[in-house]
Image (cartoon, rainbow, N blue to C red):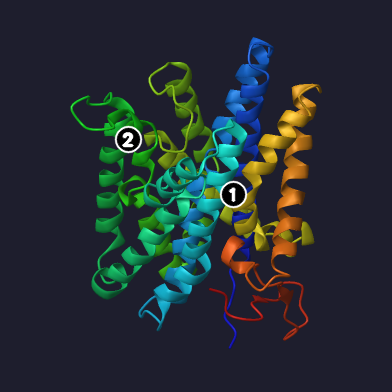
Amino acid sequence: MKKELVSEVIWLRCLACLTVVAIHCINMTFTNYEGTLSTQSVIFLEVLKLALLFGTPTFVFISEFLLAKSYPNHIPEKFLWKRVRYILIPYITMAVVYAFYSLIRSGELTPAALIVKTLRNIVVADYIAYFIIVIFQFYVLHIIFTKYLQKTSPKLMIPLCLMVNLIYLGFFNFVPPLNFIPSAEYIWTRLYWVPFPGWLFYFSVAYYCGRNHVVFKEFLNRNIKWLIFSPIVTFLVIMFLRFGELLPEANSKRVDILFYTISMIFVMFYLTSKIKQIPWIIDLVSRYSFGIYLLHLMFVQNFSEMFVGLNPFINIPLTFVISISASILLTYLLHKLKIGSYFVGKIGTKFTRTKETGKQNGTWAETQIKV
């Protein structure tokens, strides 16, 4: 059985993965070079980081877009079980790995501390793989949409989801931690990232774009002369709110990132649809993106510290390239073991151009159905 692949998704997945790694490289630079970076360097890196914040929410769009396109009217058997096996189990496995790793780095490794940290990682998603829990909530939500809401007009559902998303993020963006709530500081600092209302707008847009893929592409072609400017306009808003100290936190859970991310996705989707071939390096990063996502932070932290004697603008690209390469290599080696997929999930299938017509714009197809 073969299933058509949207080639633009390969580009989106690759670019989203690269932006996540780059953001962590920049964060480590702020940590390792604190007090030594010039004001101009800090501002430049902060602006660059803000520009890359579309990466994490793009994964929500990709995930739901593919589901809605592949299963617009029904849910296949073992839908959730396949995703538990190759996505949720690696989340649990890597929760133990990151607990062990973080405690070794801090010099606080004890059996009791390892148990506590592992439970925090798993139960409240207190480590880099928290996003898997976000995605898993949308698997469940996809089932609900497919069964009950598939005929609801996007003109109603998308604005409704946007309103819920804005209210949710706006509350945590603009209201200080409420001290009468237990662990309020932790909730406002990190835990509010996990519940699905913080990502609902991306899901709803992706759902209707995936269900109506042809209509979506027609919309982009008709409106690109206006859409092409939307990332610039929305990014200027982000800059104003960040440097105006109205929203000083530079993360992807800001109300203004909602509009910037969608505009970036639409423009990238349009531009990449015009590219006839996918370079092997783009396909490689896309296929290994899950392993890169799970593993890269450990490499980024250690290589960034290792190269701390270098100029920070040499450190960042060097750490970036080596961390991605090391993550791909380790993912590849782990897959030589039978249990490898339970650590880093599955590696994507290599994609080749079909030869039905021999034309340059031939379709791309999956050689097998992926989870």
Place of residue 250 in the rendered image (x, y in percent of width and height, measured from the top left) = 48, 28
Residue lying at 72% horizontally and 32% vertically, measured from the top left: 304
Asked whether 20 or 113 is in front, the reply is 113
Q: Residues within 10 Å of mark 2 (few under 14, many from 20)?
A: some
Outermost residue to the left: 180
Outermost residue to the front: 111
- Identify which amino acid the numbered label 1 is placed on: Ala
Please state, as top left, top right, bottom left or bottom right, where the N terminus lies in the image. bottom right
- CB-based contact (under 8 Å), mark 2 and mark 1: no
Q: Which disc number belongs to residue 16?
A: 1
Q: Which disc number belongs to residue 187?
A: 2
Q: Residues within 10 Å of mark 1 (few under 14, many from 20)?
A: many
Quadrant in the rendering for residue 358: bottom right
Residue lying at 26% horizontally and 71% vertically, measured from the top left: 151
Asked whether 151 or 297 is in front, the reply is 297
Query: Mark 2 and mark 1: span between their CA atoms?
Result: 26 Å
- Identify which amino acid the numbered label 2 is placed on: Ile
Q: Is label 1 in a helix, a strand or a loop? A: helix
Place of residue 133 in the rendered image (x, y in percent of width and height, measured from the top left) = 41, 55
Q: Which disc number belongs to residue 183?
A: none
